[in-house]
Image (spheres, helix red, strand yellow):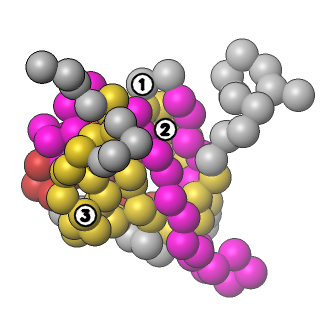
Amino acid sequence: MADNTYSTVTPYLIVPDGDALLRFAKAAFGATEKQCQRRPDGVIGHAEMQIGNSLIMFAQGGGAWPARPAALYLWIDDVDATYKRALDAGGTSESAPEDKPYGHRNAGVDMGGVTWWLGAPVRKA
C-alpha cells in the first residue's frame, strides 16, 4: 500500500545514463531531485525525482539490471513550450505538438530510451 510519498503506481525507470536523465528532467520539466544513492562506481543506483505532484524512481542500468525502454505521460499546461524546453535540454523529437481528434494536444520526446509524452486538453477558442 502506498504511503504519503508514493502513489499506488510509481514509475521506476532503468536507463542507460541516470545523470543525463536527471539533468534532462530538471531542465525540461522542472524536476526536483528528492534522493540519489550511488553505487561504488559512482553511477546512480537508486534515485527519486519529483515532477509536479508525481514521483519517479530511477536507476542506471547495468549488470543484472540492463536499461530498458519506457514511456511516461505528463499532463502539463503548455505542450508547445515544454516540447521546446525538452528539445533544448537534449531530447529527440518523436512527434511535434499537434491537436488530436480525442481532445488532447500531444507531443513526444525521447531521452535515453524513455519516451516522454506531453499532453494537455485542447483549448477551445
Say which mark, if any, is on residue 122.
Answer: none
Position of residue 70 measured from the top left corner of the image (x, y, whole percent): 54, 64
45 inside magenta stretch: no
What amino acid is at disc 1?
A: Gly
The answer to whether 19 is drawn above or below residue 68 in the figure is: above
The 10 Å Cα crowd at callout 2, few under 14, some 14 to 19, many 20 or more, is many
- Asked which secondary structure carries label 1, the reply is loop
Q: Are the residues at dot 1 and dot 3 in contact (C-beta closer than 8 Å)?
A: no
Position of residue 9 measured from the top left corner of the image (x, y, whole percent): 72, 39
Magenta stretch? Answer: 54-83
What amino acid is at disc 3?
A: Ser
Q: Which residue is mark 2?
A: 49
Q: Is residue 6 visible?
A: yes
Residue at image position (58%, 74%) is 68
Residue at image position (39%, 70%) is 112
Q: Which residue reaches farthest front?
A: 101
State which tag comes first along the sequence, 2 or 3.
2
Residue at image position (53%, 30%) is 54
Q: Which residue is mark 3?
A: 95
The 10 Å Cα crowd at callout 1, few under 14, some 14 to 19, many 20 or more, is few
Q: CA distance from mark 1 to mark 3?
A: 23 Å
